[in-house]
Image (cartoon, helix red, strand yellow):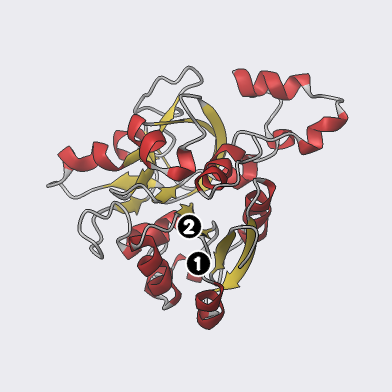
Amino acid sequence: MRNVPLVAVIQFPGSNCEYETAAAVRASGPDARVFRWNQLRELTDASPDAFVLPGGFSFQDRVRAGAVGAKERIMDVVVRMAEAGTPVLGICNGAQILVESGLVPGWRPGAVQAALAANHVSGRSGYLSRWVFLRATDAGRTRCPWLSRMGDRVVPVPIAHAEGRFVFPAEVPDRIPECAALVYCDVDGVESAAYPVNPNGSTANLAAIMNPRGNVLAMMPHPERACRMWQVPRATPGAWGDARAELDGDPGLSAAGGPGALVFDGLARSLGIGGAS
């Protein structure tokens, strides 16, 4: 029996955020181990307590982002354990894989009922890398273990994607609030469909969606790139920017937890080991 919960970070060909994601998990308390997409037996033997699918460009985004990764056999393990209640987080490309696997929104298990389309809002399109503000929905912070530490805080986190716009079939608009977990907003928590508040034109300003049980979360922003306060830009407006400015010149800056750590702290708490922030 292990003393610390284990989180499996799944590395696909083209993933590029696996090691910093594992570091973010460890900073919040659980252990983390990177498993390659073809380490099926090793993953099964490890029987992890949670999974993270990190960002990157799995299989070069061929066909469309996440489409090939979702068909890999290792996802059979992730799907089976997710259906049993194991927490699963997909970040950026990982979110795209979760959507393509049918785990989110998960209204019909195994069926793909959402897509992550090319960015397009206010006449802007293409790849976008910038900081945005997020807040958890009521359902997100109550049903999703990953978001249980966020409360009603507005959180700055970076994005870096070209296909991050959540879209849904025409027949399911009334169900979209059920899966809404994180929304884009301004520094005061106010939503807008216009750029830059909504950076990619996502339906209902969605930054992340979840399955009905709440244990599977697909988010486009990168919390692992904001898990330390030193990663937060000095010019960030609001409470997090003020806190960052106060730490200038402080030797504690390198260890201070940042806004993205709240996501991993939420998992740690759900696994019974507290969380750092």
Eyeballing the image, is 187 above or below 252?
above
Residue 78 location (% of width, % of height): 42, 67
Quarter in which the N terminus is drawn: bottom right
Determine the secondary structure under disc 1: helix
Q: Secondary structure at mark 2?
A: helix
Residue 128 in sight: no
77, 154: nearer the viewer: 77
Residue at image x 82%, y 24%?
A: 248
Q: Earlier in the sequence, mark 2 or mark 1?
A: 1
Q: Which residue is mark 2?
A: 93
Q: Which residue is mark 1?
A: 58
- How far, Cα to Cα, is label 2 from label 1? 7 Å
Residue sitting nearer the eye, 39 or 45: 45
Quadrant hosting residue 140: top left
Q: Tell me where residue 269 appears, x and y as whole percent.
A: 54, 43
| Tally of marks | 2
Looking at the rendered image, the quarter that the C terminus falls into is top right
Left or right: 9 as drawn, with respect to 71: right
